[in-house]
Image (cartoon, grey):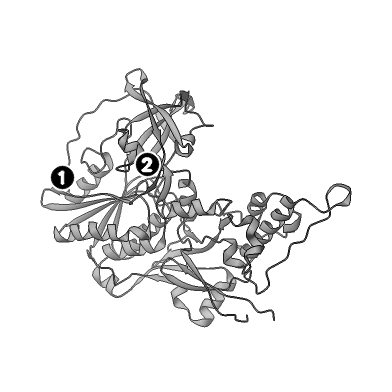
């Protein structure tokens, strides 16, 4: 039997010995196919495409969760690598993706973004038939401190009507994330619609973004309620979570509200850290199962045969420095609550009372890893012409300790509350509808809402996010590979 190298993937905190059969002692040689002009070999571009297609097949055939359902397609005859990848996906797979800019994607997972520093919701006014009328407009959901958007004075609730003097439409709205610079026209909500105001030019910057954006304590009645606004699961910033939890513990909070309404997910190790810092002490100290993992037939059989339990379960981590030991948690949710955010919700629900306030979550119960050519092939020359490529295939699904999985429609809230943006109240303020409802439920005391200006126009949110990668993060980032180690050769 041919001998292979083994890649030992570290999937977040797991030391996973994955049997990646594509990592060969001898890398595959892709020859030119004679289909060029007058019987000449194909162009270099086609040869590169064939190599990329072989890379896709090697990885997907081995580790993809639904590999047994992959159609029999000759990778060397496909002329569009991204289209070929899509053809291999299982009918229920709305999450896996491929990119030719993998380094930018990985930076985004770690909180490094070339951006303006704001998170936006894109809305449109609608008629009585719920049909959009006119151009889009953008509403600032939040802005990270000390970013181009923050320095330009953008804050939650601000309206943007134009970019570079042009109305915001379905075709150009992503430019508010992608452009190097932009002249943004602010809008003002009036009784007759949105009125254009001044224009501001901002320039994007490479930012290192701490996802622990707000933490504070609200004292209401006899309750000391901790509030934590968390924007993305990034393991590198677990120390920021520790700082927040130390503050909560030293001030002896009685309750905790975790705001995940805009959190698309991220690294699983960050979710494990967060859950372990919150859950009941007996659960954490006993290293109970946070979630169990289910792989494709080959890997599941191998883990079970070899008794490698760390690849089949994610336990609570008893070594976290701060343990709040709570029995109840309130989570603020929305359609942008996805991936590791949903794992946090379902994982904790098996051990404590988890109350959801807001809207239904996204619905993602699967995990993926980032695979690059260097993870499969030992010779750099093999992938020199496509080294910037990478893929994020689904490799497992997860279930909580009660067996809850396949929640494709997301988790509905216990209390449905609209995330009001026109006008918008500050995050962490009791005037903000989701937090107000959460505190009312905790204290059983109603909070008088301040009257605010209303518009007679009905609008709906078309899309939202912080960066061009938000949709991909909601779809695929829950179990991304964070590192890999090439080990000694073995036979299988």
Above or below 382: residue 163: above
Relative depth, front residue between 273 and 3: 3
Residue 383 picture quarter: bottom right
Left or right relative to 474: residue 146: left
Above or below 481: residue 4: below
Residue drawn 18% across the image and 52% down it:
225
Relative depth, front residue between 81 and 249: 81
Q: Which quadrant does the C terminus fall into?
A: bottom right
Q: Which residue is mark 2?
A: 117
Q: Can you tell which of label 1 and label 2 is closer to the viewer? A: 2
Left or right relative to 223: residue 407: right
Residue 156 picture quarter: top left
The percent coordinates of residue 236 (x first, y second) are 36, 60
Q: Is residue 358 visible?
A: yes
What is the spatial separation of the Cα atoms under label 1 and label 2, in whole angstroms?
37 Å
Number of the label disc, if any, that sits on residue 330: none
The percent coordinates of residue 209 (x first, y second) are 35, 49
Q: Which quadrant does the N terminus fall into?
A: bottom right
Q: Which residue is mark 1?
A: 445
Question: Do residues under tags 1 and 2 come within 8 Å of each other at their CB atoms?
Answer: no
Question: Mark 1 vs mark 2: which is more N-terminal?
Answer: 2
**Residue furthest out toward the left:** 222
Q: Secondary structure at mark 2?
A: loop
């Amino acid at each position: 039997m041919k001998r292979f190298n083994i890649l030992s993937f570290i999937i977040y905190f797991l030391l996973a010995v994955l049997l990646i059969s594509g990592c060969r002692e001898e890398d595959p040689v892709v020859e030119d196919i004679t289909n060029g002009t007058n019987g000449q070999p194909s162009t270099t571009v086609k040869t590169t495409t064939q190599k990329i297609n072989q890379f896709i097949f090697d990885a997907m055939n081995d580790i993809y969760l639904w590999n047994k359902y992959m159609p029999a397609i000759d990778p060397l005859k496909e002329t569009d690598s991204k289209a070929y990848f899509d053809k291999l996906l299982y009918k229920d797979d709305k999450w896996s993706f491929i990119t030719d800019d993998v380094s930018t994607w990985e930076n985004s997972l770690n909180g490094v973004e070339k951006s303006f520093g704001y998170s936006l919701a894109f809305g449109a006014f609608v008629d009585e038939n719920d049909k959009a009328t006119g151009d889009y407009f953008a509403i600032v959901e939040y802005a990270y401190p000390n970013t181009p958007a923050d320095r330009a004075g953008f804050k939650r609730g601000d309206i943007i009507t134009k970019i570079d003097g042009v109305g915001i439409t379905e075709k150009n709205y992503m430019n508010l994330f992608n452009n190097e610079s932009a002249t943004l026209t602010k809008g003002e909500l009036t009784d007759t619609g949105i009125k254009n105001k001044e224009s501001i030019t901002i320039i994007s910057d490479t930012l290192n973004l701490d996802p622990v954006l707000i933490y504070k304590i609200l004292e209401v009645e006899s309750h000391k309620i901790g509030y934590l606004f968390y924007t993305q699961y990034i393991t590198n910033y677990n120390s920021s979570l520790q700082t927040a939890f130390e503050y909560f513990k030293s001030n002896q909070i009685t309750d905790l509200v975790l705001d995940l309404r805009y959190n698309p997910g991220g690294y699983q190790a960050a979710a494990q850290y967060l859950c372990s810092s919150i859950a009941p002490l007996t659960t954490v100290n006993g290293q109970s199962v946070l979630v169990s993992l289910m792989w494709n037939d080959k890997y599941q059989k191998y883990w079970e045969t070899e008794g490698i339990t760390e690849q089949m379960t994610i336990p609570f981590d008893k070594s976290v420095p701060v343990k709040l030991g709570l029995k109840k948690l309130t989570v603020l949710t929305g359609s942008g609550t996805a991936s590791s955010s949903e794992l946090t919700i379902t994982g904790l629900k098996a051990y404590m009372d988890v109350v959801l306030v807001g809207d239904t979550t996204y619905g993602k119960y699967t995990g993926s890893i980032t695979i690059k050519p260097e993870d499969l092939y030992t010779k750099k020359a093999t992938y020199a012409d496509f080294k910037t490529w990478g893929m994020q295939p689904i490799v497992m699904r997860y279930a909580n300790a009660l067996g809850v999985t396949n929640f494709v429609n997301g988790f509905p809230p216990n209390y449905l509350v609209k995330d009001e943006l026109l006008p918008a109240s500050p995050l962490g303020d009791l005037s903000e509808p989701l937090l107000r409802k959460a505190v009312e439920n905790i204290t059983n005391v109603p909070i008088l809402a301040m009257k605010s200006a209303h518009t007679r126009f009905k609008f709906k949110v078309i899309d939202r996010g912080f960066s061009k990668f938000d949709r991909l993060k909601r779809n695929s980032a829950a179990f991304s590979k964070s590192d890999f180690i090439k080990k000694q050769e073995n036979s299988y």
